[in-house]
Amino acid sequence: MTAAPSDSARADRVAARRGYSGPALLEQGFRPFFVAAGAWAALSLALWIGMLTGRVALPIAFDPVTWHAHGLLFGFVGAAIAGFLLTAVPNWTGRLPVRGLPLAGLALLWLAGRVAVATGAWIGPVAAAAVDLAFWLVLATAMAREILAGNNRRNLPVVAAVAMFGAADALVHAGVLGWPALGPVGLRLGVAVAVVLIALIGGRIIPSFTRNWLAKRGAERLPAVRRPLDAATLIATVLVLPAWAAVPDHPAVGAALLAVAALHAARLSGWRGAATGAEPLVTILHVGYAWVPLGLALAGLAALAPAAVPPVAGLHALTAGAMGTMVLAVMTRASLGHSGRALTADRWTVAIFALVTLAALGRLAAAFLPELWLALLGLSAIAWIAAFGLFTVVYGRIALGR
């Protein structure tokens, strides 16, 4: 992370923001995209359950399982990534945020992608892919322009991650355009990129927010600064996860995943999460990150002992667990902080955190308890829809400036 903008640049930016007279929803990237992420997370899962039970039939070009995974990964997580970056990059560069009509255009392009993928059988898979992938091209271009214009090249890896996420999306579309083996690789690669982003950004914000919170309370022990461990963890994650995306069941990949999981666990252990129980807004960041080593360890064990650990266990620990929890942890905190509200979790926010944790635990348990699979799946789905539905209602008011 680069140095903060100068005082004069900050003052100019604040003055320009105060002069903004458009709708509050389009003032900063987190406002439309976090609402979109929450609403789509709830709606897409409700549609998926409807498809499983035969009550909903969408004109999709994907098979139903791929549509479900694609919608949550590139739709829900994708919107959260866009909202975070569109809000964070101006703070990194000192430049004004993308807002107003350009922000509306980006949000509508994301929405067009959801509609196109949901109607792929009508408009054709090529058209669906073109509309869906256009969002990643435009977002990566916009982020690169802002970072380069702000002389903030240290954060260019984030642009590379966005581009790689778009490439993973392209592989999923290629799966329905005549290269079926590429679809699953694309989904796993998308998960890999999301986990790398959690490791990269989480490694910045979790110890920082924890340190600030503990310091305000006079704590003597603060999160440890262990840069060699951080660097080793990130490098190992970037090297191993693409191999998992390509050959998830290879024993060597399984062993490497267990080693990377140990690195993440060691990293997390130094951040003093156990001391933050009095503020759920901080604690949930540690809970979300804890799903990363657990998911990687389960994925590694699935490669080494598939009879004991089903592959979906690690996958859902990383998706429903790490991504679902971290996305909500970041969206709630960013929404409060960037709207000038106190950084503390009220009862509704605590309920959101409890529900997403229940959803993740239920989905993980379903992988190991096939006799209770349907009941646990139903419990997980209800909790997930409730968590993100509640977020959309409660934090949607903040996004609208209320």
Image (cartoon, grey):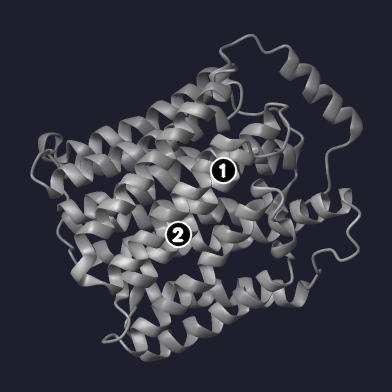
Q: Residue at x 34, y 53 (%)?
A: 169
From what the image shows, is residue 309 above or below residue 198?
below
As drawn, is 382 to the left or to the right of 50? right
SS at mark 2 in the image: helix
Amino acid type of the residue that numbered disc 1 sits on in the rendered structure: Val
Q: Is residue 142 visible?
A: no
Q: Which residue is mark 1?
A: 350
Of the two numbered discs 2 and 1 on the same chain, state the one appearing first in sequence. Answer: 2
Q: Amino acid at mark 2?
A: Gly
Q: Which mark is residue 375?
A: none
Snapshot quadrant of residue 4: top right
Location of the C terminus by quadrant is top right
Q: Which mark is residue 321?
A: 2
Q: Is residue 185 above or below residue 7?
A: below
Front-lying residue, 251 or 377: 377
Q: Nearer the viewer, mark 2 or mark 1?
A: 1
User: Can residue 343 be seen at all in this image of the molecule?
Assistant: yes
Left or right: 59, with 396 as reference point: left
Q: Residue drawn 11% across and 40% down?
A: 121
Q: Is residue 335 left or right of residue 247?
A: right
Give x and y (percent) for residue 211: 81, 56
- Which residue occupies 54% across, 35% down? 348
